[in-house]
Amino acid sequence: MKIKLHPSDQQLTLFAQGQAAPGESLIISAHVDMCPVCQKRMANVEMALAEQVLTEQSPLPDRQMQDMLAQILATPQASTTPAEVHYLELDGKHFALPRSLQRYASKINGWSHMVGKLWQARVDLGIHGRADFIYMEKGGSVPEHTHRGHELTLVLDGEFSDGKGHYDTGDFICCDGQHTHSPRTDADEGCLVFSVLDQPLHFTSGLARLLNPFSHLFFK
Amino acid sequence: MLVGIELNKYQAQGDVTNEMVACLHTVAAKRCQASFARLFHYFAPRLRAYALKQMGNDALAMELVQETLTNVWQKAHLFDASKGAPSTWIFTIARNIRFDMLRKQQHRKEDICADDLWPVLCEQTADLAQPELDEQVTLEQVGQLFEALPDKQKQVIEAIYIQGKSQQEVADALGIPLGTVKSRTRLALQRLKEMLSDED
């Protein structure tokens, strides 16, 4: 089992600089937690950035230096405690989450059962757009849709397909207005994903088109 | 001639890196003020150049510099030389603090903080909830191979990976330096990895 889909170099660099949008940063961070390849990529990007950024100097006046040093030395050594492990619960199932998403397991506003065999739990991140955990039971699917903005999806557990490709645990998927897809899963254990959206989805086929006027309620 | 100059430059850079690694270790182990002063004088002007560009205001820039170096002083034990150079570690601390400062300053309402995004200042513990994907199938094998480790390595691995202790806690409990815990962990993991690939 190997992760095939990763954030691009540009996405990773912006993330490493702290310049990516907060929701995007969070989902990239969760991917990095799951992906040894991207952990190495991150380490390399950060090393290059550090070299670039910490070469130039802007000296401080001596007195200011002395004052600051004295103030720092007067602070006590901090003790840090390891974080507790939280699980995401749905219907008696427990899902382990990547480190970066741990804190949000307890912050969901409950699961709601959507059409088909879909479950959705919104995570209130206070970001522009929205973030959700979405669980598809075996045989579950999301009606065919495209995107007005960007949809970033990270497979947390299980696998799914969307007519374009097959995605496995750890895969990081970017979709925009050029992608029309209808995700579904046939895996016995279903599929749990984390998704970050900056604009509502746009449903493109059959009866699901009727959802469009309400798409601000459904996945937005 | 030019080649000689280049070599000298790289060598000098390597020397500085080694010196900074040694300083961080002495700060972590003994809270050595002289070592910290050396780190401080080297990094403060560099961090200030970065901070001025990022914050665009001298007072905020100074706050960023001070906050970053305070973390270096307080959390030097979290620096892990096997993961990267001191300058990389210190840059990532500054990047994290900048992120949280800007969030506060711009009154943004996101509930996402730098510690979630970049675990630079988190105590590193083995995450039992998250076995590496490639290794899930071989958990049982690992159990057997674990038994084959030397006692000292087994002790450290058991405390960290099975009891979920931090490296610092293990060092305290066994009364050995943090660096020893780190190197034993590294050696043990390396050994497990070798044994696993031998089996394939």
Image (cartoon, rainbow, N blue to C red):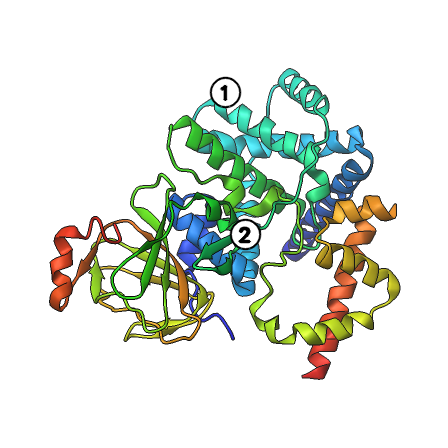
> Which structural element holds mark 1?
helix
How many discs appear? 2
Q: Disc 1 marks which amino acid?
A: Ala
Could you say where residue A213 lies in the image, as x and y percent from the top left? 12, 52
- Which residue corresponds to the image point at 67% horizontal and 35% vertical from the top-left? B72
**Going by the image, does A26 lie left or right of A208?**
right
Most extreme residue toward the bottom is B200
> Type of residue at label 2?
Arg
Q: Residues within 10 Å of mark 2 (few under 14, many from 20)?
A: many
User: Viewed as shown, does residue B51 lie left or right of A217?
Assistant: right
Q: Position of residue A73 (x, y in %)?
A: 72, 24
Read off the residue under disc 2: A99
> As displayed, is residue B63 above or below residue B21?
above
Q: Using the image as rendered, state which of residue B98 and residue A58 is in the foreground.
A: B98
Q: Taking B79 as reference, is A220 left or right?
A: left
- The residue at the point 77 percent across, 54 percent down is B182
Q: Residue at x 58, y 34 (%)?
A: B46
Q: Quick check: marks 2 and 1 in contact, CB under 8 Å?
A: no
**Residue B125 place in picture, x, y as percent:** 67, 52
Q: Mark 1 packing: few (<14 Cα in 10 Å), some, or many (20+)?
A: few
User: Is residue B177 at least partly visible in the picture?
Assistant: no
Q: Is residue A172 above or below residue A129?
A: below
The residue lying toward the viewer, choosing from A46 and A199, is: A199
Which image quadrant is residue B163 in?
bottom right
Front-most of residues B32 and A111: A111
Q: Residue B117 at x, y = what percent?
A: 50, 46
Q: Is residue B27 visible?
A: yes
Look at the picture and state if A72 lies above or below B113: above
Q: Which residue is mark 1?
A: B59
For label 2, the SS is helix
